[in-house]
Image (cartoon, helix red, strand yellow):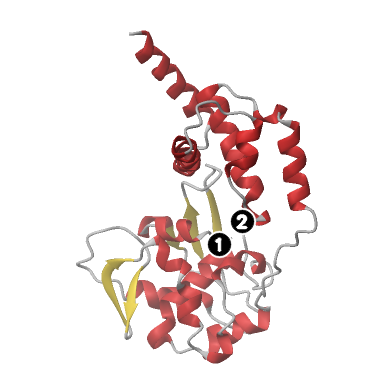
Amino acid sequence: MENFELEDAVKEVMDGILPKKSRKIYEAQYDTFVKWCCQRKLENVNEDVLLKSKTLSSSTLWAHYSMLKTMLNVKRNIDVSKFYKLSAFLKRKSEGYKPKNPKVLTLDQIDKFLLEVPDKDFLMIKVALIFGVAGACRGKELHQLTISDVTDMDHALLVNVRNTKNNVDRNFIINNSNKNGIDLIEVCRKYMALRKPETTHSKFFVRYEKSQCTVQAIGKNTFGKIPQKSGRIPKFAKFNIIYWTLLSQNLGITVS
């Protein structure tokens, strides 16, 4: 009985400590570490064990350390922050590390994409671009949008974003303040009008092929592959959805 009560207590603590949307990642990191220890028949976790556990690249070192520190604290009551040799090792490992500076599209390149790329094959991508920049949306947020989240107010589109990463709902407006005269609202309306009446789900973004929408919802991983599809056009090969959020003000779309 006591073991069950202890397990319930641990679960309750974890529910309060671990980020809800990242819990699986934390648990996977901990499970990987536990398996590594089992393979080497290491029963006690100490500073030396952690120092030998694995060699990580500088880009992921601190993220993995942070997750493992939290899980060891919750699961085994081990305070890794007191392992000073480990902290020194992590700092030394990160010395001289410089993250890669990704290439970002300019305002003119985005406008060029919206104006010159044919709607026949890229209308959905254009709408995803407009939404992504206007609302600083992540791919998962675009995937979760439903038709009830988008309201046509004649002069603008009002978009509600729910279930965000920081658990705070937000909204944004798409209007036609683009300096190059691109009718952003009509681009979106054209896509919305092609939605098939027999579509049984409420997802806003559906697949688009040869000037027609299908009834199939677009998966969250598909948004991450959009740059690959856009890259088929040589002059837009550097197109990258990750940096839409950095261009929200420059595109001339109002964010509420």
Query: Residue 251's spot in the image, x, y percent?
Result: 64, 73
Query: Residue 129's spot in the image, x, y percent?
Result: 52, 72
Nearest to the observer: residue 217 or residue 14: 14
Quarter-of-image position of residue 90: top right
**Disc number for residue 173:** 1
Q: Is residue 117 above or below residue 164?
A: below
Nearest to the observer: residue 218 or residue 42: 42
Nearest to the observer: residue 49 or residue 112: 49
Which residue is situated farthest in the left direction here? 198
Query: Residue 33's spot in the image, x, y percent?
Result: 50, 39
Circle 1: element type: strand
Task: Give the residue pinned by disc 2.
Answer: 256
Decide if residue 95 is in sight here: yes
**Disc number for residue 30:** none
Residue at left 71%, top 69%?
101
* Crowd around label 2: few <14 · some 14–19 · many ≥20 (10 Å): few
Mark 2 or mark 1: name the one nearer the start of the chain: 1
**Residue kind at label 1, given as amino acid type:** Ile
Query: Residue 205's spot in the image, x, y percent?
Result: 37, 66
- Where, quadrant-wise, is the N terminus in this rendering? top left
Residue at left 75%, top 52%?
94
Quarter-of-image position of residue 46: top right
Circle 2: element type: loop
Q: Is residue 110 above or below residue 164?
A: below
The reply to whether dot 2 and dot 1 touch (C-beta < 8 Å) is yes
Residue at left 54%, top 32%?
71
